[in-house]
Amino acid sequence: MIEDLLHEPLRNSLDHCVKCTICETVCPVSNVTPLFPGPKYAGPQAERYREQGEPVDEWSVDYCSGCGLCTMHCPQGVKIAELNAHARYAVKQRGGVPLRDRLIARPTVLGRLGTPVAPLANAALRARATRVLTERLLGIHRDAPLPAFAGRTFQGWARKHEGPATGTKIVYFHNCGTEYYEPDVGEKVVAVLEHNGYRVEVPKQDCCGLPLQSNGLFEDARKYVLRLARALAPHARDGTLIVGNATSCTVMLKREAREILGLEDDPDLALVSRQTYDVCELLLELHDRGELKTDFQPVEEVVAYHAPCQQQGHWIGKPALDLLALIPGLVVHELDARCCGIAGTYGLKREKYQIAMDVGADLFNQVAASGAGLVACDSETCRWMIEHGTHRRSVHPVELLHQAYRL
Amino acid sequence: MSPTLHYDAVVLGAGVAGLTAAARLAEGGARVCVLAKGVGSTHLAPGTIGVLGYDPERVEKPADALPGFIAAHPDHPYALFGADAVAPALEWFADRVEAGPQPGYRYTGGLERNHFLPTAVGALRPSALVPETMAAGDTNAPVCVVGLPVLRDFYASLCAGNLRRGGIEARAVEIEVEVGRVEANALGLARRFDDPAFRAAFAGRLALLLRPGERVAMPAILGLRDPHGAWSDIQRRLGGPVFEVPTLPPSVPGIRVYNALVAALRAAGGRLIVGAEALGVEREGERVTAVRAHTSGHDTLFSARWVVLATGGFASGAITLGSDWQPHETIVGLALRGMPAPGEPRFAGDYFGPQPMSNVGVAVDSGLLAEGTENVFVAGAALPGAVPWREGSGEGIALASGHCVAQSVREREGAAAAA
């Protein structure tokens, strides 16, 4: 069984666990609810009792939001979040995956359905009655932050967009959030890249499979991520870099798909994984080389910056902070709260919404205390959650660069 | 091709040694980036700064004992940078904590005398510099040890019993608190004690159980974000001295140390990347030009003029012992020192005894520059020649060596600028 094979390297890492509890101190979920017993307990400890091929029945792992902070902070290199993802897959294999999870894990399906009828769909999503009904029928919490369909797609814009004829070629991986909900963010990313001498290619592309993976639908997730790898790889073979603005989706391409879905041997994914950059990572490196344009005009604004968990999972620190520091007039408060709570689709679920709000409370309070009118954050689902929890506008850091460039 | 980022200094490791070196370098104007595989030992340590506790008998006055200790241990880290380098490091640390994110929280003491503070098992552990919230542990006055049954990492009766055996009048009481399962640990309770209403109610119930003249010992859970507020508030409400006793990990006072040092680093413009494991280095002759780190998808090169290795020793995996019985420093491949000679014993039968293998560490000069390199400095447990668990010296070595490394780099920068 493929799961057995790919599970071995992860499982071997658990012997490095010295039970120091550092992961327990950083877990956003187990610090607010007893339903998830914590990364150490559910991860390396429980893993010792799991026998491959034997039935499992521990739904507590489904309360892990998959943020990955445990793995990131572990000083011993134990793949805690990854082990938990496998345990979640196993328990869902046995117990079944609800229709809701199958639905919300397919943003492209939702996007294609909602986009043509955006005004109607958005009105329905705003109406209390529909939300109550959706909660009863599907289990999507009535108060959970759902984005509004843009009514157009980013690909539609990109097809008509005439970029510069020359420049360094770069491939833009825009993700589903940009495609269906925030095409304007994608347009700004392209504008900032073009301003810095790039010629941006936008291949046809689909979902990276991350929501499927985090909902325990590994087989479907593999299909999606490999399809995406096939779409992107031909553009990257000549050394062209791939850049994305959705830090969760880019970390899926960089690492999670290979590690969690066991796709280490796929050459297309390996290539894409190696050449994918987060947009702030790319721009900071450009700046380091002295090649980033710094013709920034003042932006007189106080902004709070939150680095999402999966942005942290790039293990590159917080490049957005260094970039935002280049903008004259901009006052940036770095927040140190861990997680906004949403974790992609986690906080949408009826039984998990309150947990997500409890996780996010620290962040929301810090935003309020910072006096910032605006919150910068790299991941779209986190931005929607932050807007929901703080009643302040939340933007991608590149939007602020775009504003400062006056493009 | 790996992307490259340029810094003046790259520091490997986010324990006390690494964060101290990094923050101090950043304060001197250097562009600094700390790379850490994970969070360091701070979260496991009691948060006290022991400099010299045993030589081998209990040390009352570290300032007086250090010169003799250094003379007797010429290979010890303290012998490299000298006794005089320790006090400024302690002072620097105390200043950073006081200016840190925990309002009013401060350390007290220094090298003049050791504080003998009760541990969770009621033994007295010597430390030079201690959080103000623990200082009242250092007297022989009668003590009431307070346990919270939900906190299963701290047994008040065990602590009190051993204190009595040591000649201190001690008794245990327990206070039930209404907390959920997620808060039934040191960190969760510390967050509750940040809440004035919670601690007021707690102090109100505890006050009824206290006898006149008793000190109060509590597990170290008095606040995470506002420990000074929590501790002083409870002390005021009880009308007598209250002190914290470090618990099993997660250590709340240790997390406060981490938070304070990270805040000092950030305030000085330094960067910290947790999760980026250093894999190796690029070099030109004896000069290390960049550190290669494992970042997601592709490696990243962190180019630097100065590299500080503060990755720890055997326990953290920074030094390994090969099947050929040769020790290796895993990132730079630095020359090591202190390996027992062939035929000599490598390990002692007594687990907590002075293990010969623990002397192994990176060979450095008196400026903590690694042998065979032009620009790699070493701080903390990667240094050879110490038996920290016997000496009660681990935090002191980490702090003083981190502080010294920054000094060495500054001096070389100054010399280079003058040239």
Image (tube, coloured by chain):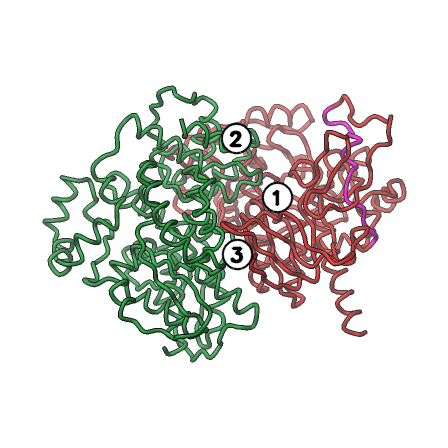
Chain colours: A green, B red
Q: Secondary structure at mark 3?
A: loop
- Please say if the residues under marks 2 and 3 sit with CB atoms less than 8 Å apart: no
Chain to which mark 1 belongs:
B
Res. A138 image quadrant = top left
**Percent coordinates x, y for residue A279 in the rendering:** 43, 62
Q: Which mark is residue A14?
A: 2
Q: CA distance from mark 2 to mark 3?
A: 34 Å
**Percent coordinates x, y for residue B352 in the rendering:** 73, 27
Q: Residues within 10 Å of mark 3 (few under 14, many from 20)?
A: some
Residues in magenta, as a range: B351-366
Foreground pick, B184 / A407: A407
Amino acid found under the numbered disc labelled 3: Pro
Identify residue for label 3.
Answer: B101
Res. B202 image quadrant = top left
Foreground pick, B399 / A104: A104
Is the residue at mark 3 from the same chain as the one at mark 1? yes
Magenta span has B361? Answer: yes
Q: Secondary structure at mark 2?
A: helix
Q: Does residue B375 appear in this view?
A: yes
Q: Secondary structure at mark 1?
A: loop
Q: Does residue B203 appear in this view?
A: no
Residue shown at 37% from the left, 34% from the top: A36
* Residue at far right of view: B71
Residue shown at 81% from the left, 54% from the top: B84
